[in-house]
Every structure is written in structure tokens, then in C-alpha cells.
Amino acid sequence: MAINRAMRAALHVLAYPEVDIKKTYLVEREIKKLTARRLKNPSLYHIWEHKIFCGDHEVPVRIFMPDNRRRDCILLFFHGGGWVTGTVDSYSAVCADMANMTGCLVASVDYLLAPEHRFPAGLEDCYAVARELFLNRELMEALDIVLIGDSAGGNLAAAVSLMARDRGEFLPGRQILIYPAVGNDYSENSPYPSVHENGTGYLLTAKRVQDYLALYRSSEEDLKNPYFAPLQATSFAEQPDTLLITAQYCPLRDEGETYGQKLRDEGGYVEIHRIPDVLHGYFSLPVRYGPVKQTYEIINRFLEGDNA
């Protein structure tokens, strides 16, 4: 069902206020923790006892077990939240749903957040966990490993894949990018229509994305770095088979689809699906919500494919 006039009015009221998130990000983190969907059975996950270090600190990983494990696969998940406000706690219900809906183990990475830890700190945490899993396959019983992330987490998944190719240490076979943030310009100069069409009045605003980028980056030069903004890559070859899912009323829609097309143009296997009549962030809703259920149907078909 298309968004009607009444819904548009409600969305305008609910849209992120144009506040200085440099002053409010700590409060927003706590609000997300408090308002996140709660797990019905917290025993469904545990903190992985195996220690993974990135530099001088440990990177915690939270493991979610499906009620019915039916795939020899682990989904390595990087959560969203603009690299600033999301947490593994606020995504626990999402990860539990993901495990049950796919029949896979889900490993959620508790990467360092900006602005306390700016680019590339969080990305290096994600890379360190991926590297550990890919190079020490016995840790997870040699399970098939699939990268997955939403929004800022989609950015991190794409960046880990590019970094893995460039460093030559391992290469993921598949990645699932859900409305990923892969660009670097959300101003009036953005080349993507979705930034202008959906950048106000649809919960996530273009200004909010710009503010997140400002908190995440270490310098202006980061905006040209493909590990910061994957669309800045000079080559899109040798990348994983990719499932890319976008939301119709999301400012990130067009850049995500462009990224998928660039991977496809380099000969990669890419599926691009635009979910109609939904907003950025819809994937965190309960699975009884039709578009979430539809998204898992798409994900399961991709996981069942022989394209890996």
C-alpha cells in the first residue's frame, strides 16, 4: 500500500529532528537501547568465548542460535546506526529473527563506534573478525560465511569485501547489503534522485546522514576513500556474489542500486531488489510485517542459490 497523505504527515512529525547530533549521540544510543525490541528468550545468544583482537583491544562477537538450524552457514552481521548510535544490544531482536528466519548462525560484531573511535576504527574491527573467521575456519566448523549488514552496517560489509580483496588475505564468497550507505554526498549537489526525493520527511533525513558522516570521518580526505564510501572504488572487480536490497522511500536507495550495478558491470553476480512502500530501517521491524517477511524470502532464495 502506497504512503498516503495522512501517513506522510505522520512521518513529517516523526522524522529525525534537525539537531546537532554531536551533542545528542550519547542520548540517542541510550534511547535506542531502551526502545529496541526485546528478545523473548535472551538465552538464544551468547558472547563468543574465542577472543578476537584488533590492535590493542578485543572485539566482542555475539552469537545467535536458530531454533531450527537448517543451513551450514554463518551470517557475519554488522549493525546499522550511522556508525554512531547503533549497538549490538539494539539489534539483538533483529539478529534473533535473522537466525530463526534463515536457519543460520548469526554472529553480530560489537565494533567500535564514532565519534570516540573514528574511521577506520570500526571498519578495522569488522575486518579483524571476518579475517579471523575466514583464515581459521575450524573456529566455526568450516561453515560457509556470508557478510551481511544494514545501512552503516551495509557500508561496513561492502568495505570489508573491498579491503579483503586489496589486502589479499581472504575473499568472502557472498555478501548481503541492506539499504547500504555507500556514498559520500547527501547535499543538494548529490547526483542521486532519492536523496532529493526522500531526504526529508521519511524518518532518515539527508542532513542526518551528513551529520553521521561528519562524526564518522577522521578528515575530509576520508570522503574519497573507498573503504569509507565504497562507491569511490576505482575497481569493483573480484567482489562477492551480492544481494542488494533497497527501500523505496529511503535517501540511500539510488546509491545502493548504483553500487550493485557497478559490481554487475564488472562481471559479478548481483541481485538488486527494491522493496516497495517502505522506509529506511524497516528491516528492524518484527517479521510479521509483510515487507520484512518478503525480505527474508529474498534472502533465503539467495542463500539457497548455487552462485557461491
Image (spheres, helix red, strand yellow):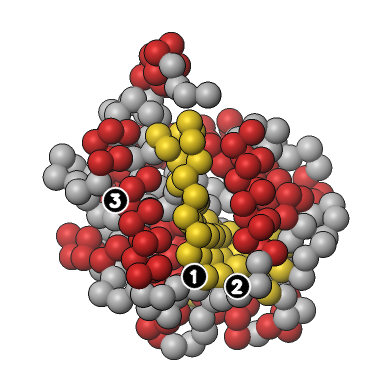
Percent position (x, y) of residue 194?
Answer: 30, 40
- Helix, strand or loop at mark 1: loop
Q: Quadrant of residue 232?
A: bottom left
Type of residue at label 2? Asn
Numbered disc in front, either 3 or 1: 1
Residue occupying the far bottom of the picture: 168
Residue occupying the far right of the picture: 68
Q: Which residue is mark 2?
A: 307
Type of residue at label 1? Tyr
**Residue at horizontal 45 percent and vertical 22 percent from the top:** 3
Q: Which mark is residue 213?
A: 3
Q: Residues within 10 Å of mark 3 (few under 14, many from 20)?
A: many
Gap between marks 3 and 2 measured at Cα: 34 Å
Q: Which mark is residue 269?
A: 1
**Residue at horizontal 56 percent and vertical 70 percent from the top:** 174
The correct choice, above or below, for 37 with respect to 96 in the image is: above
User: Badges 1 and 2: C-beta atoms under 8 Å apart?
Assistant: yes
Type of residue at label 3? Leu
114 left or right of 108 in image: left
Q: Quadrant of residue 182?
A: bottom left
